[in-house]
Image: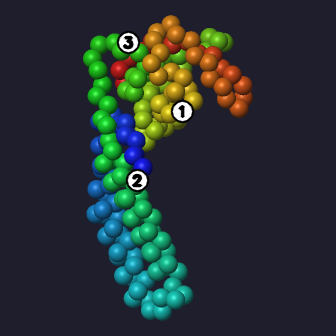
Amino acid sequence: MLDKKPVYLTAEGQVRLEQELAYLKSEKVQQIADEMGRAIAEGDLRENAGYDEARRAMWQNNTRIAELEDILSRVQRVELGNGIPTEVQIGVTVELETSTGQRMSVTMVGSHESDVFSGKISNESPLGQALMGKKVGDEVQVKSPKGSQTYVVVELVYA
């Protein structure tokens, strides 16, 4: 069996996944059971779209439950520090400046918490990998399909 790597989550991320798991195991299972009951009451299951849809929903729900249980069994919780971080790590918000003087802020998180639209990037993403371990003043270069971009680490704070 392959060794599964740890899943890095902040306390907030772990709670969110635990809440989703609890919802899927209770409310969602009951909703699907109700839908299945209604579909069975309609009669012939061979050509019953409602029954097929309920079975598909049950399969998807069970798959997500198994995925969440696996993730939560491998959690390594990232505790946020106090004061000012000395280097980029998970749980740190990084203020970056591009070569054109534009500034952007990203928060380093594990891959299961990443959300680019909220400014949360995975430590496994190209930018995340380049930033890990860097200190204020360090320069990183990240290659992307649009070319190469250079960033300077301007400030570090705990998320």
Q: Amino acid at mark 2?
A: Met
Q: Earlier in the sequence, mark 1 or mark 3?
A: 3
Q: Quadrant of the C terminus?
A: top left
Could you say where residue 108 lies in the image, as x and y percent from the top left?
A: 44, 28
Q: As drawn, is 152 to the left or to the right of 41?
A: right
Q: Residues within 10 Å of mark 2 (few under 14, many from 20)?
A: few
Residue pictured at 39% horizontal, 82% vertical: 38
| CA gap, disc 1 and disc 2 | 26 Å
- Point out the residue furthest to the front here: 1
Q: Secondary structure at mark 2?
A: loop
Q: Amino acid at mark 3?
A: Thr
Seen from the viewer's position, the closer of residues 110 and 41 is 110
- Point out the residue furthest to the bottom here: 44
Q: In this figure, which residue is indicated by the disc labeled 3?
A: 86
In the picture, the disc for residue 1 is 2
| CA gap, disc 3 and disc 2 | 38 Å
Residue pictured at 29% horizontal, 43% vertical: 15
Seen from the viewer's position, the closer of residues 47 and 77 is 77
Q: Residues within 10 Å of mark 3 (few under 14, many from 20)?
A: some
Residue 142 in sight from this viewpoint? yes
| CA gap, disc 1 and disc 3 | 21 Å
Q: In this figure, which residue is indicated by the disc labeled 1?
A: 125
Q: Earlier in the sequence, mark 3 or mark 2?
A: 2
Q: Amino acid at mark 1?
A: Ser
Q: Secondary structure at mark 1?
A: loop
